[in-house]
Image (spheres, rainbow, N blue to C red):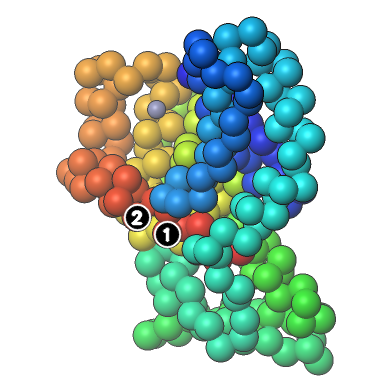
C-alpha cells in the first residue's frame, strides 16, 4: 500500500490509496470522508503512479471542496462546548480582548477567545494544540530518558494518530486533544515504546503495557470506534 498523502491547503493530510486494475480503462477517484478520510484511486495497468498523482492534482479543487465540507465537520461558535482531553470546555468570545483566556473550573473549563470573530476557530485550534503538546511533553517526561524523542511535532493526519521515526521524531495528530486523556496517553506510550522496538512485535506490545499499565486494549478499541469523531470540529 502506498504511503502517499494529499496535503490540503488547510494542512490536512489525507492518505492516498492506489490500486491497479487490469481491464480498467480510466482512472477512477473515490474520496472517502467517513469514518476515515482517504482518497482511493484505481488506475489501469498502463497508467503509472506518477500519472495517477498528476490526475489527483488536476482534481485538487474538487477534492478540497469535498474534504472541507465533509458532513461530519461542524462549525465551532461561541457558546459551544467541546471536550479537550476528557474535560468539558465552554467556548466564549470576547472581541474587546486580543488575548485568549483559559479558565479552569470545577465542573467545566471556559476558553474565552479574543480577537476578531472570524478567527475564532483558528484561535481555538492553536489553544487546543498547545494544551495537547504540554500534556504530551509531561507524559514523556515520566518515561525513562533514553526513550525521549529528539523532536515532537503535531500534524493533522487522518488515519494515523502517532508515528515515530528512526531519527527520533515523534509526530501526533493534534486531534488527540479531543480524545479522552487515557486514549491520548495510550498513543503517546505506543510511540515511546517505538523508541525501543520499531516494529509491532510481542516485545513491543509488552513494552507498551509496561509504560501504559492496564487498559491498552480498551484505549485501542476506543480509537477504532470513535477515531472519526475527533474530526468533528476544526
Ligand atoms: Zn506503532
For residue 41, above or below residue 34: above
Ligand 1, seen in the image, is in the quarter at: top left
Q: Which mark is residue 229?
A: 1
Question: Where is residue 201 drawn, in percent x and y?
Answer: 28, 16
Secondary structure state at the residue bearing disc 2: helix
Q: Which picture quadrant has residue 191?
A: top left
Query: Is residue 137 something that shows in the picture?
Result: no
Secondary structure state at the residue bearing disc 1: helix
Query: Is residue 82 something that shows in the picture?
Result: yes
Q: Looking at the image, which residue sits at the far top? A: 46
Q: Name the quadrant of the C terminus.
A: bottom right
Q: Residue at coordinates 48% horizontally, 39% vertically from top-left?
A: 159
Question: Is residue 4 or residue 52 the one in the foreground?
Answer: 52
For residue 160, above or below residue 43: below
Side of 13 where 71 appears, left or right: left
Q: Which mark is residue 226?
A: 2
The answer to whether the residues at label 2 and label 1 have Cβ atoms under 8 Å apart is yes
Q: Which mark is residue 165?
A: none
Side of 8 where 15 appears, left or right: left
- The alpha-carbon separation of the residues under discs 2 and 1 comes to 5 Å
Question: Where is residue 215 drawn, in percent x and y?
Answer: 20, 46
**Label 1 CB, ligand 1: below 8 Å?**
no
Q: Residue at coordinates 81% horizontally, 81% vertically from top-left?
A: 116
Question: Badge 2, how many Cα within 10 Å: few under 14, some, many 20+?
Answer: few
Q: Residue at coordinates 41% horizontally, 50% vertically from top-left?
A: 35
Amino acid at each position: 500500500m502506498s504511503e502517499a498523502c494529499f496535503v490540503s491547503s488547510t494542512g490536512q493530510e489525507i492518505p492516498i490509496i492506489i490500486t491497479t486494475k487490469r481491464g480498467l480503462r480510466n482512472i477512477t477517484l473515490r474520496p472517502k470522508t467517513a469514518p476515515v478520510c482517504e482518497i482511493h484511486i484505481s488506475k489501469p495497468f498502463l497508467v503509472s503512479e506518477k500519472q495517477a498523482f498528476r490526475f489527483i492534482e488536476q482534481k485538487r479543487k474538487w477534492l478540497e471542496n469535498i474534504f472541507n465540507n465533509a458532513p461530519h465537520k461542524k462549525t465551532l461558535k461561541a457558546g459551544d462546548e467541546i471536550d479537550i482531553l476528557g474535560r468539558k470546555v465552554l467556548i466564549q468570545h470576547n472581541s474587546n480582548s486580543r488575548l485568549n483566556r483559559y479558565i479552569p473550573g470545577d465542573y467545566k473549563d471556559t476558553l474565552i477567545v479574543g480577537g476578531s470573530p472570524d478567527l475564532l476557530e483558528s484561535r481555538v485550534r492553536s489553544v487546543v494544540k498547545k494544551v495537547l503538546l504540554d500534556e504530551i511533553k509531561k507524559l514523556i517526561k515520566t518515561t525513562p530518558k533514553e526513550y525521549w524523542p529528539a523532536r515532537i511535532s503535531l500534524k493533522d493526519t487522518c488515519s494515523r494518530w502517532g508515528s515515530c521515526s528512526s531519527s527520533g521524531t515523534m509526530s501526533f495528530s493534534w486531534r488527540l486533544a479531543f480524545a479522552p486523556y487515557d486514549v491520548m496517553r495510550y498513543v503517546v506510550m505506543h510511540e515511546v515504546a517505538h523508541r525501543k522496538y520499531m516494529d509491532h512485535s510481542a516485545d513491543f506490545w509488552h513494552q507498551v503495557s509496561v509504560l501504559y499499565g492496564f487498559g491498552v486494549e480498551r484505549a485501542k478499541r476506543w480509537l477504532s470506534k470513535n477515531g472519526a469523531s475527533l474530526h468533528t470540529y476544526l
